[in-house]
């Protein structure tokens, strides 16, 4: 699309009330806006990135047989009371004076257990898995860190239902595998970390932690093997020997981007969710719950992929693949050529942001570095007949023909 | 997908606490579930339909140059106070005792006006249009009628920004054109009806009304020409002569599925949203606001397309294109053949629901009629080598070969 038609513009200075790199860069770039503490709007650029993250998640959820649905956010008090979570701190409540008492959905074990009751009667109905990608609400006292901890944020929550503990364990590993694929497609290295279950379960669980100084968790992890524990439960500390392989244990901050919980029968007991086994005996359904935070992932990507000039989006989630920049001048040939290349890139199905504004080369390059689109293609008097191509992640400039540009940008899909 | 793997099951009897046809059929079919008054979860089947409606809307919004974004739902009190809408009845409020006062987003003129202030400074920045597809919350005292009037529902809200009244008028007609295309793609006949602006504007506005006995509005419309007014503002009544063409005026109930508002400067004044015109003079931005209710559209489709046996989805939004039914018996040939046809339909990229359950033909046909998938393809001993094909909307049965079936289902895309 044409840059002049973008709803947002970049800003030269960082917002004063944000400390996190992700918030600063995303706000300066026009990806997001803060409306109040922990509450952000996703502007069109931010929505483009988030939609790509969500699409990757959808594909991997579908690949493990999970069906998408959309549960309600106004969850009546009675549902929370059944599980004993009405008085959990993070629940935003709508009071009785407004006709009915609701807690805003901050997680959906209650609702999904209720829904499943209509459909899971026999062992033949199991296993099942459903997920949603939905805005969640949590009354976070320490809403900070930009998209890493919001009061309103997007979550992908997956729930699974099983006849046996073994089947749950199997699916739990399947989900861990799917989450690893998602992280890989997002170019994120995440550690699978043992952790406590919080308000969800008393069993140990696993978190996907991306090591980053912006993280709120501390991870004790082996410098060599996969051993990693959240500091909250860690039996080892920095300098200790790894109980798995004997190498050194290190400590580092991590951003929790996903988690997996073996719920067991906690919610099926509360919701009387039972099935008849092969012998006709009534058994509680065994459940799992698995979360990923798409908005938090967007923030994490910025924390990991940035430099002093701006963001460096991985190609899989970049808002556009190429930033086409025309360095316009009085001589009309540049604009004409830029328009032609823009039209041909679009025709080839390449996602292109076209900077056709009347602005200086310096301003355009600055914007381009801030926005972090993977490829920059410049048409200018200096480049002459050729197009100057540069990767955002590299300093190397390359002069290519239009044909070579199209080939290069379509080849590496 | 395999019917045994669907999260939901059909139900034989209608829910007791629902009167609306859409609620009864959608709940019996396993498309939705009611959690409390006016609050529904969309089960995977319902989500499939809604996603298709949303995709059609997205395509038509993109075609008129609107960019998608996602605004926040927790809207702090100060934003509503600026426009004087904090005390509008439908606002669900989160109280001060919860750290901050929010009204849940029931419409987003306030937020979008605030966001636009960062980016609209000059006449060169205009016009602009942004939209979102988002869950909205409204404290409806009379939450009834299934998906036609919920306390939590999905809305597509589009906002446009203009330098002149003329430019707004032009875009207003463009949006009406886009909405007509959306209705056509959904197979819905909607009247464009003059109406009052409610809490949005004092100007007259236009509603898209689908005539249906389930509607809550009354429409005075000409039996011949396009003249139509909401009874609330109508200058004519049933039996009068049409002021446009002299034909008879009729009255009928309508479901309001969309609306378009010329907001003028109401919100730009409240938010001090100004731009510099060609002469450098400061002018208020002129705004428009345009809504469509995707969940209400799903309910409307069921109200319009149903018979005594169930739903008849238009192909464009059906959860699947074809319902493949194997009438299994002891003789294993049927299952084998069914599996083969299922595999080939999937390979051809046709959306197929495959009923491979051990159930009677009567039960399977009943489910199929209830679910309303446009084509039913039956494999049975009776049909022999052929496949019995039937449209949901027709009584005609046709015996076709597998090759003919594939050709027929791919041809009419």
Image (spheres, coloured by chain):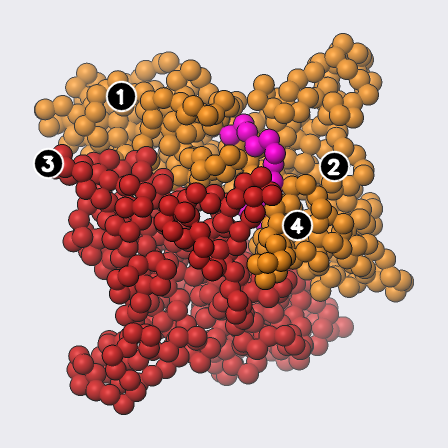
Chain colours: A red, B orange
Q: From mark 1 to mark 3, how far is it between C-alphas? A: 25 Å
Q: Nearer the viewer, mark 2 or mark 3?
A: 3
| Residue where numbered disc 4 is placed | B108
**Sooner in the amino-acid sequence: mark 2 or mark 4:** 4
The magenta stretch spans which residues? B132-146
| Residue where numbered disc 2 is placed | B198
> Camera-side residue: B237 or A113?
A113
Q: Position of residue B271 (x, y in %)?
A: 77, 57
Can you say which quadrant of the picture contains the C terminus of chain B? top left
> Camera-side residue: A33 or B281?
A33
Labels 1 and 4 positioned on one and the same chain: yes
Give the farthest residue toward the top. Answer: B239
Can you say which quadrant of the picture contains the N terminus of chain B? top left
Q: Residue B363 shows which numbered tag?
A: 1
| Residue where numbered disc 3 is placed | A279
Labels 3 and 4 positioned on one and the same chain: no
Q: Residue at x 37, y 45 (%)?
A: A82
Q: Residue at x 71, y 63 (%)?
A: B119
Q: Residue at x 51, y 34 (%)?
A: B37
């Amino acid at each position: 699309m044409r840059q002049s038609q973008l709803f947002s513009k970049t800003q030269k200075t960082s917002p004063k009330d944000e400390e996190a790199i992700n918030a600063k860069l995303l706000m300066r770039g026009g990806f997001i806006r803060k409306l109040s503490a922990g509450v952000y709007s996703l502007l069109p650029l931010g929505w483009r990135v988030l939609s790509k993250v969500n699409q990757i998640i959808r594909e991997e959820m579908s690949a493990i047989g999970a069906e998408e649905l959309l549960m309600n956010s106004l969850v009546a008090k009675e549902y929370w009371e059944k599980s004993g979570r009405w008085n959990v701190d993070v629940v935003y409540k709508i009071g009785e004076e407004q006709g009915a008492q609701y807690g805003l959905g901050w997680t959906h074990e209650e609702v999904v257990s209720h829904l499943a009751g209509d459909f899971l009667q026999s062992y033949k109905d199991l296993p099942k898995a459903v997920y949603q990608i939905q805005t969640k609400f949590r009354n976070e006292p320490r809403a900070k860190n930009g998209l890493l901890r919001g009061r309103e944020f997007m979550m992908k929550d997956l729930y699974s239902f099983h006849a046996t503990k073994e089947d749950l364990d199997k699916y739990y590993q399947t989900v861990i595998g799917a989450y690893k694929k998602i992280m890989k497609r997002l170019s994120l290295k995440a550690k699978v970390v043992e952790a406590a279950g919080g308000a969800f379960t008393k069993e140990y669980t696993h978190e996907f932690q991306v090591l980053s100084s912006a993280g709120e968790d501390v991870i004790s992890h082996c410098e060599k093997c996969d051993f990693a524990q959240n500091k909250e439960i860690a039996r080892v500390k920095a300098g200790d020997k790894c109980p798995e392989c004997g190498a050194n244990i290190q400590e580092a901050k991590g951003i929790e981007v996903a988690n997996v919980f073996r719920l067991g029968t906690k919610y099926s007991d509360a919701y009387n969710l039972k099935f008849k086994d092969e012998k006709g005996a009534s058994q509680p359904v065994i459940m799992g719950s698995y979360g990923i935070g798409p908005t938090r992932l967007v923030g994490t990507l910025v924390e990991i992929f940035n430099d002093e000039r701006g963001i460096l989006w991985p190609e899989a989630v970049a808002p556009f693949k190429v930033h086409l920049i025309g360095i316009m001048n009085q001589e009309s040939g540049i604009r004409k050529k830029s328009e032609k290349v823009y039209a041909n890139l679009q025709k080839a199905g390449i996602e292109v942001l076209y900077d056709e504004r009347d602005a200086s080369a310096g301003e355009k390059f600055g914007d381009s570095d801030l926005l972090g689109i993977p490829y920059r293609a410049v048409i200018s008097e200096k480049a002459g007949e050729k197009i100057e191509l540069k990767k955002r992640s590299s300093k190397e400039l390359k002069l290519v023909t239009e044909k070579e540009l199209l080939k290069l940008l379509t080849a590496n899909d």
